[in-house]
Amino acid sequence: MSITALKVSQKSAAVVTGAGSGIGKSFAYEIARRGGAVVCADIDLKAANKTALMLQELGTKAVAYKCDVSSEKAVEKLSNEAEELLERPITLVVNNAGVGAGGNVGEMSLKDWKWVVDVNLWGVIHGCHYFTPKLKELGYGGIINVASAAAFGAAPEMGAYNVSKAGVLSLSETLAAELVGSGVNTTVLCPTFVPTNIIENSRVPEDQKKLGALAMDKLAWTNSDKVARQTLSALDQGKLYVMPQMDAKIAWGIKRLAPSSYTRGVGEIYKLFK
């Protein structure tokens, strides 16, 4: 089966992590709207159940599944059981689950560093590690990894988050190169602000939460539903990068053209707001 014969996002059998809310929930909904069946995986089973029930109302098969993506064994178990739950081979994996924490390097606790990297980076590594061989054997499908413009933005006081998302970006680029000719597409999503509950649930000081919530409200310029639609369509077209907002595209361009000047500029702007 070729990707041109049937778009990956249509009638897919998908696993979406972090499907209980935010971008993950929007991915699950859009996949179901396109005729796909979904394993809605989330560490919060109650939230996953709500998403699954919403999809079932659309007439699609949807199953809630409790999974802590930071656990290798948990993701391995998910990869082994997902096909049975949907009663067909998995053709699409969306590694979306993520968390946030803030603080200066040297001040933010190593416990918070580990939490962020374990979920944001190792969660995606686990998903790619266990699902990629199955997709390669099938010879068809797609992997979407949710990174962030933070992967290249390098904003101060976001070290752990930046590092974790930079790893996701690099992993996605590597995976895309390895999967050339396999029939499996890879897409990495790098948004800036998208209204979700990540700031509310993040480990940052309250004043930073308020500032982040304000920025999310004023600077989002999109929403999670639009981002999910755009990313799934990009996967169908074989596109590697999705930057759904203009500010992400501008930052990406400047960083690639003048990386040192970009970093100094970010630092100077950061000083103005301190």
Image: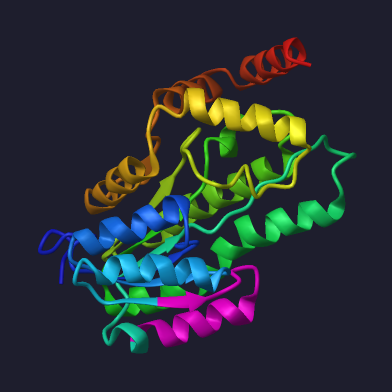
Query: Is 158 situated above or below 33?
Result: above
| Identity of the residue furthest to the right in this view | 106
Is 73 inside the magenta-drawn segment? yes
Q: Quadrant of residue 74?
A: bottom right
What residue is drawn where x is 36% and y is 53%?
26
Q: x and y percent of residue 32 in the render?
A: 25, 64
Q: Residue furthest left?
A: 5
Asked whether the viewer can see residue 180, the reply is no
How has the structure been colored for display? rainbow
Tell me if I can see residue 151 in this picture: yes
In the rendering, at what x and y percent does residue 140 appear? 25, 70
Q: Which residues are magenta?
A: 64-83
Q: Is residue 117 left or right of residue 191?
A: right
Query: Residue 273 occupies which quadrant of the picture?
Result: top right
Task: Looking at the picture, tell me which residue is in the foreground, 174 or 211.
Answer: 211
Q: Residue visible at 43% across and 87% down?
A: 81
Given residues 108 and 45, the one toward you in this image is 45
Foreground residue, 256 or 19? 19
Residue drawn at 49 percent across, 80 percent down: 78
- State whether residue 78 is above or below residue 92: below
**Number of numbered labels in the structure image:** 0
Q: Is residue 170 magenta?
A: no
Q: Would residue 26 appear left or right of 248 to someone viewing this image?
A: left
> Dividing the image into 4 quarters, which one contains the C terminus?
top right
Q: Main secondary structure of the magenta part?
A: helix
The x, y position of residue 3, in whole percent, is 18, 62
Pick the quarter of the image with the N terminus: bottom left
- Left or right: residue 174 compared with residue 135: right
- What residue do we see at 59% from left, 64% from top? 123
Answer above or below: position of 274 versus 121. above
Residue 131's x, y, as percent? 44, 74
